[in-house]
Image (cartoon, grey):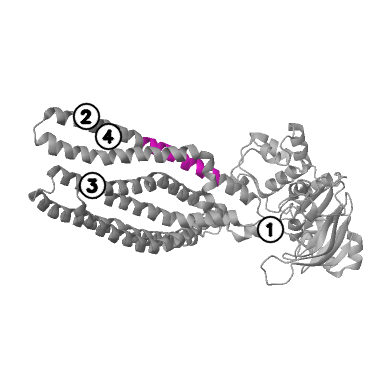
Amino acid sequence: MRKLSKYLKPHILFVILAPLCMILEVISELILPRIMSEIVDVGIVNEDTVYIFSRTMAMILIAVIGIFGGVGCTVFASKASQNFGRDVRLAMFKKIQTFSFVNLDKFHTSSLITRLTNDVTQVQQIVIMMLRMLIRSPFLFIGSLFMAYTLNPGLTNILFIAVIILIITIIIIVRKGAVFFKIVQEKIDNVNTVIRENLSGVRVVKAFVRGDLEQKKFKKSNEELKYFTIKAFKIMSMIIPIMMIVLNITIVLVLWFGGKHIESGIMETGDLMAYITYITQILMSLMMTGMVIMMLSRGGASMDRINEVFETETDIKNTENPLTDSIKYGEIEFKNVSFKYPGSSGDMVLENINFKVKKGETIGILGETGSGKSTFVNLIPRFYDVTEGEILIDGKNIKNIELSYLRNEIGIVLQKAILFSSTIKENIKWGKKDASDEEVYSAAKKAQAYDFIMNIPDKFDTELGQMGVNLSGGQKQRISIARTIIKNPKILILDDSTSAVDNSTEAKIQKALKEMKNTTKLIIAQKISSVINADKIIVISDGKIIASGNHKELLETSGIYKDIYNSQIREEDL
């Protein structure tokens, strides 16, 4: 908790007021039994109604003060914990935004969602418990022990024995339960993974009639979560019955020996009543401590998972004094570039790549699935860093260029179009947040999206479902292209981004892209038709460049390119 305590500092007023209010409530609870003792031993014994009335009024006043203290503590503790949770979630979200693909590969998406939601909620519970119970319990324990000792020091030995037994019990149970609570959080990750996969792929599930398989997968994950949750709480639930047994035995012993003290005149009846109340308060404070420790056991696992996110070093960072105005033309050069995914023991994904792209040129990158084409997309904006060699833009190593500036000058359209839950217009304006309506319409026209958008009832104000679920694949790709075109980047990368578009529409998009004279374009494709008009085409196989040149040159010099061309032309003829 120490590492996360900085998120409580802005709310220090609530953090201070909550315990102060709780101390007020505890003081009232400590005073009330003593007043009750006086009413019994003085007022009732002497039949002094005036005394009884005055002390009763005092009890009511003190009780009201205690109630205000308890309510105030709850309010301030809640404010502190909720603000704390909000700040931690925001800080985690910001941290995740800085992650490179290497960092994101370390955490599953479902795990990050669990950490942002369930784990933060668990830690919020810890905060509110600490501000209430961890303040209340020690003060109530120490205060009740002191008050009980002043009433009858001889009976206090029974209390010490009971307290020692309970403390040992709590330590043993909590240590066993903590292990299972960590497993519980991991099982929540698994459940979230299955849910996320099923919901995002629900159309595939229905198309292949595999709902029964998905139900079995979910049932398995759900059963595992249930099993370990029950196991953890079974262990922790032993605290309360053991405490109740010790409490009842202690009260019986106190009544037994206290009765003898009353008979011998050492103790009065009211004092024994007050003593039993203090015993109950002592043992109940320990019980509350046990409950807090139980929450800490579960929350401890959540804190570790949250801290794991905060402590993850972002491996792709800006250098000191990075360049922020170095990209003027968008010329790209790969110099002896090789790449292997961090932590991988396999071969290089890209090996000794050398090529240069001049300002405004269109470069086609062609190759079979798994040849390493898409890795280009990840290396140029530094989603991953090269393993060997260097990538230059306008003669400057991209590692020396400020990250946000670099990525802002590069437009990327991925094969899997990612759209967000907002209007079509807002999705296109992601590329340029201050774009005018005319710019939005112009970008949509260049991407061949304008016509189909205008045929939708709400046109550009159409609300898209999650991931653009209410659009076809080709429509989503065209909106993604419009979103990238509108930012007018110096470098434009299209990663097989017209795979779901028909040939006629693709040709129109290529024509519009060709008119972007000041933008360097890299088109990654599997279809030769997507790159046939490029200034240069690079053919990649097994992470190596095996041929390069324009379409005509490759037909004459590259047997592999010619074979691909002939096979695709025949497929189209069929």
- Give how far apart the Cα atoms at labels 4 and 2 are: 10 Å
User: What residue did someone put label 3 on?
Assistant: 150
Of the residues under marks 1 and 3, which one precedes in the sequence?
A: 3
**Which structural element holds mark 1?**
loop
Report the amino acid beneath label 4: Ala
Are the residues flagged by discs 1 and 4 in contact, CB closer than 8 Å?
no
Examine the image and state in which quarter residue 389 appears: bottom right
Residue drawn at x 65%, y 47% as measured from the top left: 472
Residue drawn at x 77%, y 35% as measured from the top left: 439
Are the residues flagged by discs 2 and 1 in contact, CB closer than 8 Å?
no
Q: Residue 57 carries which label?
A: 2
Which residue extends farthest top? 50
Instruction: Residue 67: give x, y in percent of width and height.
Output: 31, 35
Q: Is residue 87 above or below residue 164?
A: above
User: Of helix, strand and loop, which mostly describes the magenta segment?
Assistant: helix
Question: Which is closer to the viewer, label 1 or label 4?
Answer: 4
User: Which stretch is magenta?
Assistant: 71-88
Residue drawn at x 92%, y 62% as measured from the top left: 553
- Give how far apart the Cα atoms at labels 1 and 4 are: 58 Å
- Give how far apart the Cα atoms at labels 3 and 2 are: 24 Å
User: What residue did someone put label 1 on?
Assistant: 315
Report the amino acid beneath label 2: Met
Q: Which of 193 and 241 is in front in this view?
A: 241
Question: Which is closer to the viewer, label 4 or label 3?
Answer: 3
Q: In this view, does 482 lie to the left or right of 185?
A: right
Residue neighbourhood size for the residue with mark 2, other residues' Cα within 10 Å, grouped as few (<14), some (14–19), many (≥20): few
Q: Nearer the viewer, residue 323 or 366?
A: 323
